[in-house]
Image: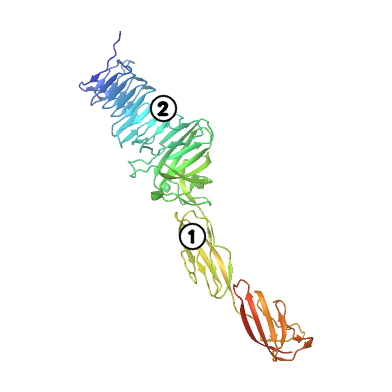
Amino acid sequence: MRKIYSFLFSIAVVSLASGQALFNNNGADIYVKDGGLVIVKTGSLYNNQIAGVGVLNNSGTVIVEGNVINDGTITAAGDTVRLSGDWINNSVYTSANSWVEMNGGAQQITGTTVTTFNNLNLLGGNAVKSQTLDAVTSGALVLNDAELATDINEMLVTNTNPNAITRNNGFVSSLNTGKLSRNTLASSAYIYPVGSPSSINPPSIFRPIEYSPSAGAANTYGAMVVKGDATLDGYNVTTMDSILCKVNPNFYHRLYHSNGNTATALRMFFDPSTDGEWTEGAHWDLPNRWNNLGMSTAGNGLGLSTVQVSGVNDFQPEPFALARKKFTVDAGPNASIYEGESTDFNPTIGAPTIASVEWTPPISLTCTTCETPTAAPAVTTLYSIKVTDEAGCVASDSLLVKVAPSDFLVPTAFSPNGDGVNDLFHPLNKNLQKLNFEVYNRWGEKVYQTNDPREGWDGVFQSVQQDLGVYVWKSEYQLLGATKSKTASGNVTLVR
């Protein structure tokens, strides 16, 4: 009957062609049963295949204070492998219901064969764990405070549970075509905790992405973030469609949809204090420009601000960025006033956040940098407003303030001789809204009176043509748009 032991190995390092190892099974089969414990102190574990034989069958716990090197077969069943060095897989690793815990500092997931972990737990504090090839996690990816640097490789999480990735302050960074990918099978929110590599353009920034597929179908989406101006990678942030005003020059994402055809809501995260304010999503697409992704919704999550757009299903090419939409300004309707009067401006500004307002010219304005100044020009003036939002987008508009004369216009003579020229005596203003107009002869008799600015005196009183000479007129009137009535008087000469 085979006996099962828990060993604490403390033997000299064996020199191997593949490197240094403290524990080398030399092609033998090793079984660690449930509850068993193997500790490899201050060195590596080498599962060495000789003549096609070399198995580590673990149902317990194996703790390695160095590398785990697999050139044979590691069969896991509810076990834990905890290592302080690199994971080097060159052969077969079967990970059913198991945990690999990487609790060292700078560690690598490397070798010549892609590892499919069941549960991968990254420990060791604020450390960087690096991939030199693709890797797969079929269970839980626990980032804790670590940075998982995939480099140009992919970390694929095949577990379709939206909570399959957990973190404290940890994140996944990538370069070039590297990415964090996830399989999805629910119309739920899937977080991609991506950040920029700490090894390039430090410090790193954490700018996650969230996909929310519109249907519960099989899809695979991926994400990575690039810190810096997308222009440097050939995606000019000053080239955009007619809807957008500005594209984020601080970072952008490369997003992927490698499997499935389900459209998804896309939620992009940013820090307003360092990234600026953004309200839209943009995609670099034909004809080689940034294009608005459509209606967006603002929000927040994970301690950051967010912009969400729906119905995204075009991920070719991969660049996506935050953006600002052009806004409009309506200075308001044109205004008409009289000399000495004023008018209030009340523009309609479509900017979500206003950085500055400027009215020009500054003539007769109570304020040139506020939204609603009062204007009292002495002459007709065209005023313009220029509004700048926090992203630096600018919109302008103008309005005309017409200044009408406040004088009561009355001729000094008229000739009621029937020749069709100057036959009637009446005010000449076209902007009277109220009038009482009276004419008196030299004896003080009222010879004419009207309240209708369209009528005038024809020189007749009591059916008798009046004598040539000077007559006195008086009037109380109110000009159109004026707030008060005024009085005026004067003389007129009747000639024939």
Q: Nearer the viewer, residue 2 or 25?
A: 2
Q: Mark yes or no: residue 114 visible.
A: no
Q: Nearer the viewer, residue 106 or 38?
A: 38
Type of the residue with mark 2: Gly
Seen at 35% across and 25% down, the residue is 99
Can residue 40 be spotted in the picture? yes
Q: Is residue 16 above or below residue 471?
A: above
Residue 368 point in image, percent of width and height: 47, 66
Amino acid residing under circle 1 = Val
The residue furthest top is 1
Q: Is residue 111 above or below residue 326?
A: above
- Which element is circle 1 on? strand
Disc sitting over residue 139 in the figure:
2
Q: Are marks 1 and 2 in contact (CB under 8 Å)?
A: no
Instruction: Name the image quarter holding the N terminus.
Output: top left
Q: Is residue 253 left or right of residue 448?
A: left
Q: CA distance from mark 1 to mark 2?
A: 52 Å
In the rendered view, would you say 260 is above or below 371? above
Residue 69 in picture, x, y percent from top left? 30, 24
Disc number placed over residue 291 in the picture, else none: none
Q: Residues within 10 Å of mark 1 (few under 14, many from 20)?
A: many
Q: Residue furthest right?
A: 463
| 56 or 274: nearer the viewer | 274
- Residue found at the far left of this picture: 12
> Which tag, 1 or 2, sits closer to the chain's start?
2
Residue 407: image quadrant is bottom right
Q: Is residue 68 left or right of residue 263?
A: left
Instruction: List the residue tagged with mark 1.
Output: 387
- Name the quadrant of the C terminus: bottom right
Report x, y in % for residue 462: 78, 86
Instruction: Choose top left, top right, bottom left or bottom right for residue 52.
Output: top left
Q: Nearer the viewer, residue 381 or 467?
A: 467
